[in-house]
Amino acid sequence: MAYLYETHVHTAGVSKCAASAGADYIAGYIDKGYSGLIITDHFFNANTAVNRKLPWKQWVDCFCRGYEQAKEEGDKQGLDVFFGWEETFDGCDDYLIYGLDKKWLLEHGECRYWTRGEQYRTVRNAGGCVVQAHPFRQRYYINRVVLSAGCADAVEVANGGNEVSFDALAFRYAQKLGLPMTAGTDIHDASLLFGGEIFGVYLPRKLNGIEDYVKMILNNEIAGVKTEQGRFNFYGDETVSAPVEIRGKNDRVISNKWKEYVF
């Protein structure tokens, strides 16, 4: 038996681009047969709705509200809800952080100033993991594609906000590097649950805590990804129009020849 989980959810009031409160998602995911979901609101350097001028404790309290509201409603209705976040660097590349909690955040305000390498090493040392979200996404506001080959434990290969070609490239990239693959809807509006394509991961065991998901990623135990059929079909015309940086373990640029990391 496999258990289905949503790994990428944004809530209104915390993620500036989200339209639905955390509690609004619960009934829809239960109806879709999910065992749980992970709230991953936009963090300090991402598209956060929380005022960055607030004292750190107050900022963290506000940041965690979307998760806390979702968990409260999940507990009422019988859906497991877990905590994570999504951080952005230079407005270009995004990372899903799993395995750390509010208490840890309150004690580590320096996370606001991390480099990619510092983020990866510190999260891993604290018992968490780092997943690069939608690595081949191209938008007008993204001036370059950054592939963090040395500072991520897994790759999100299917993302509900992506064009199919971006996911096809992410899938081949993860294959080439031998990294675990995840999928998430990147959902910002609960109405999508009643008419859109909903993504997620199939896991071999039910999660008792977010640390179980971290272990499954690090041990490459993801049983499969839920996505639309043909999502990873490669047609030969997938391309990257923006400049590309491939970064290694020390967060240094090691190449700009992205095709070497896909084919």
Image (tube, rainbow, N blue to C red):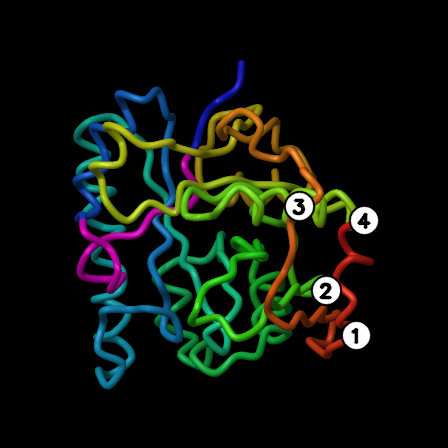
User: Is residue 42 part of the magenta span, yes or no?
Assistant: no
Q: Residue 254, which numbered label?
A: 1
Q: Amino acid at mark 1?
A: Ile
Discs 1/4, front: 4
- Mark 1 closeness class: few <14, some 14–19, many ≥20 residues within 10 Å: few
Mark 2 to mark 3 CA distance (whole Å):
14 Å
Mark 2 to mark 4 CA distance (whole Å):
18 Å
Residue 175 position in % (x across, y down): 75, 43
The residue range painted magenta reads 6-19
Look at the picture and state if 121 lies above or below 260.
below
Look at 51% across and 32% down and name the residue there.
Answer: 201
Q: Amino acid at mark 2?
A: Gly
First in residue order: circle 2 vs circle 3: 2
Look at 26% across and 60% down and name the residue there.
Answer: 17
Label 2 SS: loop
Residue 196 position in % (x across, y down): 32, 32
Q: Which residue is mark 4?
A: 263
First in residue order: circle 1 vs circle 2: 2
Label 4 SS: loop
Residue 220 position in % (x across, y down): 69, 38
Label 1 SS: strand
First in residue order: circle 1 vs circle 4: 1
Q: Residue 204, which numbered label?
A: none
First in residue order: circle 2 vs circle 4: 2
Discs 2/4, front: 4
First in residue order: circle 4 vs circle 3: 3
Foreground residue, 211 or 204? 204
Q: Which residue is mark 3?
A: 218
| Circles 2 and 3: CB atoms closer than 8 Å | no
Mark 1 to mark 4 CA distance (whole Å):
17 Å
